[in-house]
Image (spheres, rainbow, N blue to C red):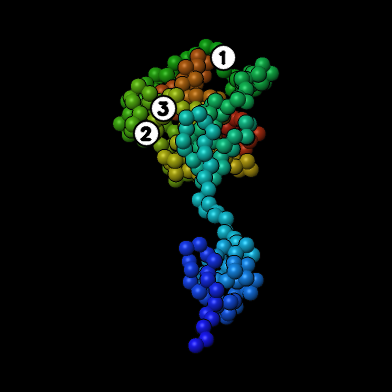
């Protein structure tokens, strides 16, 4: 009887099955004769190029995984916070979380001390304002004393109704009657803040409590500023609250009034301060 020829032994290691010689592969097309002959023949189990690691097989390209939830880490030391959008400091151009976005909060390497020329300009503006109001030194002192006394009386009432971070110790709280921007549903709102916070952080917290629109991180929008009730001056964002409370000349009083208003970048003083108290 003639010997039945059913093909060569499979050349894949540990597989000695006999198979066809590059015959048709139902459903997969035809195994190329070069692939079969390159391995010296192959069984049905290893006849595809991928199954016997054929050098002619084309590798499957894996699609790069895209991170659909990108986040931006804070550059401040020992801070592990991340934000869904970049929050860049316009001065040092580093990314920070909302808590550390102000220069004083992340100890910005480009934080500049008030220059003598700028100090002289502010003094000149202040002198002009004082000359227009016609206040004398004695009247200013008397007015400051009256404001301080009124603030002490108001402080007792503010402590009963003011909103703020309840976790703050009583010794760190500074209370204000905050007059809101013109057009707001409420005229004013009692609030308290940590005396160690920067003015910028105080504004963010007050805007959150009063549900005010806050676009201070947008270059083209009007900025929400905290203004002094006597001079109308927009307080610098990087200075701390306790710095202004401790001032000898025109300070902020714990229990006193303060104004929140939207100003353009070039506006450093609030107009018609008295209209907020009418």
Q: Secondary structure at mark 2?
A: loop
Q: Nearer the viewer, residue 169 or 63?
A: 63
Q: Position of residue 191 (x, y in %)?
A: 39, 33
- Of marks 3 and 1, the one in the foreground: 3
In the picture as drawn, the residue positioned furthest to the front comes out as 1
Number of dots carrying numbers: 3
Q: Which residue is mark 2?
A: 165
Question: Quick check: marks 3 and 2 in contact, CB under 8 Å?
Answer: yes
Q: CA distance from mark 1 to mark 2?
A: 40 Å
Specify whether residue 116 is in view. yes
Specify whether residue 181 is in view. no
Q: Which residue is mark 1?
A: 136
- Of marks 1 and 2, the one in the foreground: 2
Residue name at image x 56 percent, y 40 percent: 87
Q: Position of residue 18 (x, y in %)?
A: 50, 74
Q: Which residue is mark 3?
A: 194
Q: Secondary structure at mark 1?
A: loop
Question: Quick check: marks 3 and 1 in contact, CB under 8 Å?
Answer: no
Residue name at image x 47 percent, y 14 percent: 142
Q: Quadrant of residue 28?
A: bottom right
Residue name at image x 53 percent, y 69 percent: 10
Q: CA distance from mark 3 to mark 2?
A: 8 Å
């Amino acid at each position: 009887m003639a010997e039945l020829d059913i093909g060569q032994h499979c050349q894949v290691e540990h597989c000695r099955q006999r198979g066809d010689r590059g015959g048709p592969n139902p459903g997969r097309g035809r195994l190329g004769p070069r692939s079969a002959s390159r391995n010296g023949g192959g069984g049905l189990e290893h006849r595809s190029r991928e199954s016997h690691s054929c050098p002619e097989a084309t590798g499957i390209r894996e699609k790069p995984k895209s991170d659909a939830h990108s986040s931006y880490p804070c550059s401040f030391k020992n801070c592990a916070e991340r934000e869904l959008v970049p929050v860049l400091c316009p001065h040092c151009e580093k990314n920070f979380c909302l808590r550390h976005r102000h220069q004083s909060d992340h100890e910005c390497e480009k934080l500049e001390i008030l220059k003598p020329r700028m100090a002289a300009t502010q003094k000149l503006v202040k002198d002009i304002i004082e000359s227009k109001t016609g206040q004398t030194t004695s009247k200013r002192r008397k007015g400051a004393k009256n404001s301080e006394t009124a603030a002490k009386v108001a402080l007792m009432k503010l402590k009963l109704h003011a909103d703020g971070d309840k976790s703050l110790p009583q010794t760190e709280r500074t209370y204000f009657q905050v007059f809101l921007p013109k057009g707001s549903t409420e005229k004013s709102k009692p609030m308290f803040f940590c005396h160690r916070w920067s003015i910028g952080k105080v504004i963010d917290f007050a805007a959150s409590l009063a549900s005010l629109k806050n676009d201070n991180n947008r270059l083209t929008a009007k900025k929400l500023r905290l203004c002094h009730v006597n001079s109308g001056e927009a307080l610098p964002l990087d200075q701390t609250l306790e710095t202004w409370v401790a001032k000898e000349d025109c300070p902020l009083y714990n229990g006193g009034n303060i104004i929140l208003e939207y100003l353009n970048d070039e506006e450093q003083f609030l107009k018609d301060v008295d209209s907020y108290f009418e």
